[in-house]
Each structure stands twice: as C-alpha cells, then as structure tokens.
C-alpha cells in the first residue's frame, strides 16, 4: 500500500505543476510590452520582423504609448491576423500620471 500512496502523491504533484504552468505563471516571461520593448524584443512576436519592429518603435515615438494591446494594429502593415496570433502575448504598461504638487497655505 505505501507504493500506491506514493504514486497518488506523485500524480497529485504533477497535476498541480501542470496547472501552475497552464495558468500563465510560466508564460508571463513571454509577454511583450509594446510600450517599452526594444526592437529585438518586439521581433519575438510572431510575424514581426526587423522592419515591423522598427515601425512599432517609430509609431510609439511619434504618437506616444499604446493604450491597449489592439492599438498595435494602428501601425502600418500590422493587421488583425498578426494581432490575433500575438494577442495573448502583447501587453501595455502605461506609466502612472505624475501628480502635480500644490502648496496649500
């Protein structure tokens, strides 16, 4: 009976580990923040090569940060097909607004 108990414990541990990795904890490292990613990091997205990565960087510089992942489609040449392939990997981080200090007398 002790061997059967060990097998059950091992199986439970395996199921737990598979559950953790399938919920995104391991996949978070694969996310690409299109507001902060370098050209090389952007090229990790499927269908985004050197030229499109450069266009994303240039768009970002000219227009400011993307507000949501789907905004990547505003970049010329990146359409719904490319977005759909990557939508689970694209993230956008918006910097918190700077609060103006007001002196109250």
Image (tube, rainbow, N blue to C red):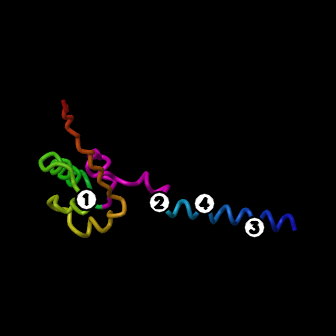
Q: Earlier in the sequence, mark 4 or mark 1?
A: 4
Q: Label 2: which residue?
A: 24
The residue range painted magenta reads: 24-46
Numbered circle sitting on residue 86: none
**Quick one: label 2, few (<14), some, or many (20+) residues within 10 Å?**
few
CB under 8 Å between callouts 4 and 3?
no
Q: Label 1: which residue?
A: 68
CB under 8 Å between callouts 3 and 2?
no
The answer to whether 7 is drawn above or below residue 104 in the figure is below
Numbered circle sitting on residue 17: 4
Q: Label 3: which residue?
A: 8
Separation of marks 3 and 2 at Cα, in angstroms: 25 Å
Query: Which corner quadrant holds the N terminus?
Result: bottom right
**Quick one: label 4, few (<14), some, or many (20+) residues within 10 Å?**
few
Decide if residue 9 is on the left or right side of residue 78.
right
Residue 15 quadrant: bottom right
Which tag is nearer the camera, tag 4 or tag 1?
1
The answer to whether 16 is drawn above or below residue 49 in the figure is below
Separation of marks 2 and 1 at Cα, in angstroms: 19 Å
């Amino acid at each position: 009976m002790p061997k059967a108990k060990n097998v059950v414990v091992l199986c439970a541990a395996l199921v737990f580990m598979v559950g953790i990795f399938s919920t995104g904890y391991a996949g978070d490292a694969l996310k690409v923040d299109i507001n902060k990613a370098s050209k090389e990091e952007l090229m990790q997205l499927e269908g985004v090569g050197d030229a499109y990565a450069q266009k994303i960087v240039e768009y970002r510089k000219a227009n400011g940060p993307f507000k949501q992942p789907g905004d990547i489609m505003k970049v010329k040449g990146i359409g719904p097909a490319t977005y759909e392939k990557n939508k689970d990997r694209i993230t956008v981080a918006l910097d918190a607004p700077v609060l103006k200090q007001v002196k109250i007398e």
